[in-house]
Amino acid sequence: MNNTSFVIDGDQLDLSAGDANTFKGFGYLSCNNSSRLLLDYKWEHEDSYRQILQILFGGKHPLMRMIKLEMGDDGNTSSGTEPATIRHQGEAANVQRGAGFQLVADAKEVQPNLKSALLRWGEPGFLRQACANVKTDDPDQNVPESAFEPMYQWYKQTIIAAYQQYGYLIDYVDPDRNETKHPMVKWIKWFANRLRHDQTEFPEGFPVSAYQQIKLIAADQNYETDFGDMMVADPELRKQVAAVGFHYNTNDGAQQPFTQLADQYHHEVWYSEGIAPMTFGKYRVKASNGDGIGGVQSGLDVANRLIKSYVKSRRSFYIFQPAVSAYYPGVNYSHKELIAASRPWSGHFEVDNVGLQCMKHFSDFAKAGWADENAWRYLTKACDSGVGGTENLDHHRDAPSYLTLMAPDKHDFSTVMVNDSAQARTYHIEITHLAADANPKLFIWQSVGPHQPNEDYDQHLKQLRETIMPVDGQADIVVNPHSIVTVTTLDLQNDDEVAYRRLVSRHDDYTLGINNHSGVLYDDDFSYGKYPNNYLASRGNTPRYTTDQGGAFEVVSQEGYQVLQQMITEDERALDWEYSFAPNLTIGDDKWTDYSVMTTIKFDNQTQQNSPAGNYFGIGLRELTDVKGHLESAPYVFKLFSDGLCQLIKDDQVVSLTHVDNLDLNKPHQIVFKAVGNTLRAVVDSQTVFDFVDTNNPKFSGRVKLGCGYYHTQIEHLTIKKAEEKSPVVSKRLDDLDDAISYSGQWNHVCGLGNTKWNRTLSYGTASDDKTTKLAFKFAGVGFSLIGKQEAASQLQIAVDGRVLDWNRQPQTAADRTENVVISGLTNGEHQVELTVIGGTYTLDAVEWLA
């Protein structure tokens, strides 16, 4: 029998621990380019932008209580770059670059008491030489103290600029590098002392005293726990550092340093970077494993992490990386979010309602925050977790997992219980020493997946299941398989913010450019004349719909008109966090198919430097995955070098070379790179330099990449146009686990896979003599594509509108997210498709409609 007993004793609530045991709810980490496209949502569809902020930061029970910002360095820090606020010594800090600092300001309009924090991943170019040894095994000794003051000034001037520009003061700063393996204790102490005693060179009206009281958080390690040991052993360090945090590990170190820091020394301990749920819950409920809304890296898994990380290491705060994925999917760590926002032209976004509600089982039923806000406390003796794993909690999932939060006045409490197993668990609770009724009425709120196949995925999310009256202070609570339950004394049954309602975007999605009858999919001369005069300045001169994956591309004035310029030379190149490729950006819609990119560019022939990457300009076509953040992530790339060398690259391999003679670097040059089906053409100044036919596993759709070396290369105009008048575009994409696709026969539906699969899901259909393996769907348009890399050979029979079009189709191998079968040229209209797996095992990732 799965039975657990525990006592909820108000006398055991510790009110003397300050913020060590306050329930702080959740935080939003804006880093690695993850918020970049919110800049475009704000300008193109402000209602969507405000709706996203309201979902996360608004209401009586706000989910997020902090935004933590990356101090960018113009280098890729996993899924893209964050721009540096200062790029060279003496430059004024510019916090309008990137989305992060203004995101804090806008979120504070919704939640004025929202906290903020700063952390760097790497160092911008002007600090590269001084900090060159920061990645060694002993940076505390190897980085000279002469580097400290310029590093400190970067932080100081950025904090001042944020206050002057947006009116808020940063609350927490981590002086060390993100996920350092060797914390720089000497530097942290130096920084703390400098901060506490700095009284000079502040602008008039700046709150110097409050600045001196900014709290330090350290050391944001990844898995490692040795900074906790350093804190326990060093009273001076404990005096300087108010909060400690580490990532992706629920457990404490061998000597329980973080538990000691909270329980004995009353320090805040944060889960200062953790995953958001991977694979939306609406797809998870379709998985063949029967885990419902649970499973590894699900909302239930994250809820278990929150509980276990408090029980095992006293983490009182969980920060999502990211909460919102406002970058183009396909980059590193895609499909890990509460909200996906990558369609700014339409204003459409998607909410993982399951993941969100799992988190709201905590924040809706307790006041989150800090001690001075009268936040609820963890009742430590009424918390436990036996779930197995230190990051992914993937075994012993039937073990007890519960967490109790209590109001400081001891009138109310809420206990969250998670059961991500196939067996129910019963909790016997005894309630004593509350300030209110000895037998308080208990409200039992539950989230669980659908009970029947025909039910909506969210039909049973955060519902008031029952009320219970304890007898002699005792009650039994059943937690059903793969569910989360909150037991609370709060009567919130009439609170319209608590009862579940599906959160959706107000805007339908559409493919960028699909409604432009001229065939132009996107056109940009970077003047933005139809926007207000402050459009560019307010966004740090960021061009529309772009996400930088290396370097920095900004709009600058050039002889009376605007051009897009790459801003980073070798002197300004970042000291990378891990690695970063040459400057490149991504733009546009992954639903584009046959198109041409025409641009006018001008090489930088003024910067004299040794640059390993070389001086070139490149265009990439049909990009769908970009895990490494480089130009050659696009399957097809054309590069023109300043010496006239031309390269045609497929799948990161040069497949053809040629040369343009007498390339004049003092003049602009027009480049056209076009894809039609499996044929490619590159043209320079009206001269065709490449014609190429791809007969080996071609790719047929994806967005555009542009890139160059570490030079001030300029782009004067960009036009992306359908290759031919009747070229189709993808009008809609269905995940393999979408309700619109029906399956019969031998299928295995899998969730929680790698980030290069759409929504981290795949469906495997195996031919069978016993039962025909089929899938069926309807679509509107002129054709469809089947998406997904084939792990084994298979054969399909394809029928459209009851007529077999192909009796024995062998899908091409494809690659992740790319086409293995394309059927086109059908009459425009509605069609019914039926696919039968007649041999082998077929892998499906998605279905795309061609219009």
Image (cartoon, rainbow, N blue to C red):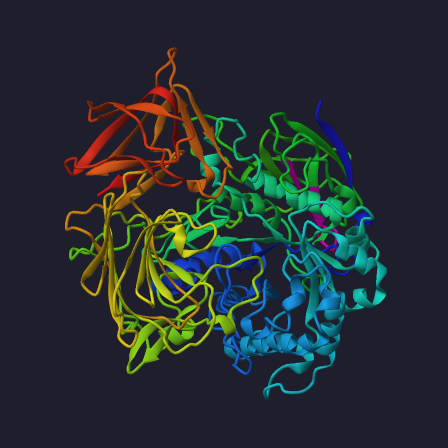
Q: Is residue 623 above or below residue 644?
A: above
Kindly identify the residue that appears in the image at 69 percent across and 37 percent down.
401
The tally of labels here is 0
Q: Is residue 455 left or right of residue 596?
A: right
Residue 766 relative to residue 731: left or right: right
Q: Is 771 or 713 nearer to us in this picture?
A: 713
Residue 437's place in the image compared with 538, above or below, is above
Is residue 173 visible to the viewer in this orientation of the structure?
A: no
In this orientation, does residue 223 appear? yes
Left or right of 10 in this view: 513: left
Q: Check the picture and name the quadrant holding the C terminus.
A: top left
Quadrant where the image shows the N terminus: top right
Asked if residue 411 lies in the magenta stretch, the reply is yes
> Residue lying furthest top in this view?
770
Q: Position of residue 316 (x, y in %)?
A: 69, 53
Observer-nearest of 80 and 739: 80
Residue 463 placement (x, y as % from top left): 53, 38
Percent coordinates x, y for residue 662 in the rendering: 25, 70
Q: Which residues are magenta?
A: 403-418
Is residue 643 inside the magenta stretch?
A: no
**Picture coordinates of residue 352, whole percent (x, y):** 47, 45
Q: Main secondary structure of the magenta part?
A: strand
The one nearer the camera, 581 or 33, is: 581
Residue at 58%, 36% (x, y): give it: 296
Location of residue 802 with respect to 427 vertically, above or below: above
Q: Quadrant of residue 735?
A: top left
- Camera-side residue of 291 and 549: 549
Q: Residue at x 73, y 73 (%)?
A: 192
Horizontal side of residue 74 vs 366, given as left or right: left
